Amino acid sequence: MLHLNKIRTVLIPALILLFLLVVSFTSVIANKDLITDQDKRPRAVNVKVGATSAEVKAGKEVNLWAIIIGISRYKNGDTNLDGYQISNLKNAADDAQAIYDFLRSDEGGNFRDINEGGKMVLLKDEQGTKSNVEKALSILKDAKSDDYFIVYIAVHGALIPQRVDNRTIDIPYFVLYDTDLRDMSNTALKMEEFRNVVSKVSARKGLVLSDTCHSAGVQMAGRDPSSSSLRANVRYLEEMQRVSSGIGFISASDQLEQSYELDELGHG
């Protein structure tokens, strides 16, 4: 896994591009005969985002999948409900839009939206309900082994104590647009479920980017918000460590760090 501390979205497009090139650039190295002929005259090099050298040489179609999620405004944002409160964010939705726009560009690989016949879904703010997020993630099950996928998620993370096998344990969740902190099991997404979805994707090439630990962003009744947020990030990273080694992973903060929104950057 790859962990980069305090990554800002202004850098993430470059990181995505670097990762895509690493996946596809072997086509240049492995096929030097494509670069020059016997006269040493330059020849065209065919490099396709998300494709290996063998796939490029064989002209094999590689489908590009992407699920982009960013929630700045929550249904119950900045509202105290029985001691529970979700803080709205400033930049998560804008960051998601920036990632989406980059992936649609030539440099980003020309991903296409699902409404255009492609395989990319963007969910921002009120679109990011539990139902919509689960539906979007479910389309990844149709990816083939030679395909390439990206998942980007910028939301709050929180730990919720629950009784399991006669003992209380903290369960890490993603906080979605319609999440009610008083009923997390029915309105939020378990990080374990997210990891399971990623683990079961047939595509052997992929990248997961997350910005999920916003300092003191979720207030649970009777609990320290900073501690809960921090430990949620630890649990998330532990879950993602169990994903197949063929999948790259970039997090906005390491296990003992929290990510912040900085006004001067204009991003999360």
Image: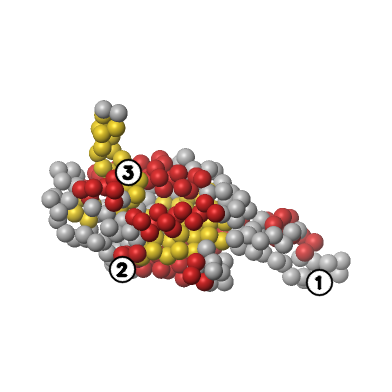
Q: Residue at x 55, y 54 (%)?
A: 142
Whether 116 is drawn above or below 4: the answer is below
Q: Residue at x 67, y 64 (%)?
A: 47
Of labels 2 and 1, earlier in sequence is: 1
Cα–Cα gap, marks 2 and 1: 49 Å
Instruction: Determine which of the numbered discs, if any, sits on residue 172 in the image.
Output: 3
Where is residue 44 shown, x and y percent of the image? 74, 70
Instruction: Determine which of the numbered discs, if any, sits on residue 41 in the image.
Output: 1
Give the residue type at disc 3: Pro
Of labels 3 and 2, earlier in sequence is: 3
Taking the image as shown, residue 142 lies to the left or right of residue 160, namely right
Where is residue 193 shown, x and y percent of the image? 40, 45
Give the residue type at disc 1: Arg
Of labels 3 and 1, earlier in sequence is: 1
**Residue 257 is at least partly visible in this image:** no
Instruction: Determine which of the numbered discs, if any, sits on residue 264 in the image.
Output: 2
Q: Residue at x 23, y 47 (%)?
A: 183
**Residue 228 is at least partly visible in this image:** yes
Q: Nearer the viewer, mark 3 or mark 2?
A: 3
Give the residue type at disc 2: Glu
Q: Nearer the viewer, residue 109 or 166?
A: 166
Within 10 Å of the Cα at label 1, are there few (<14), some (14-19), or many (20+) other Cα atoms? few
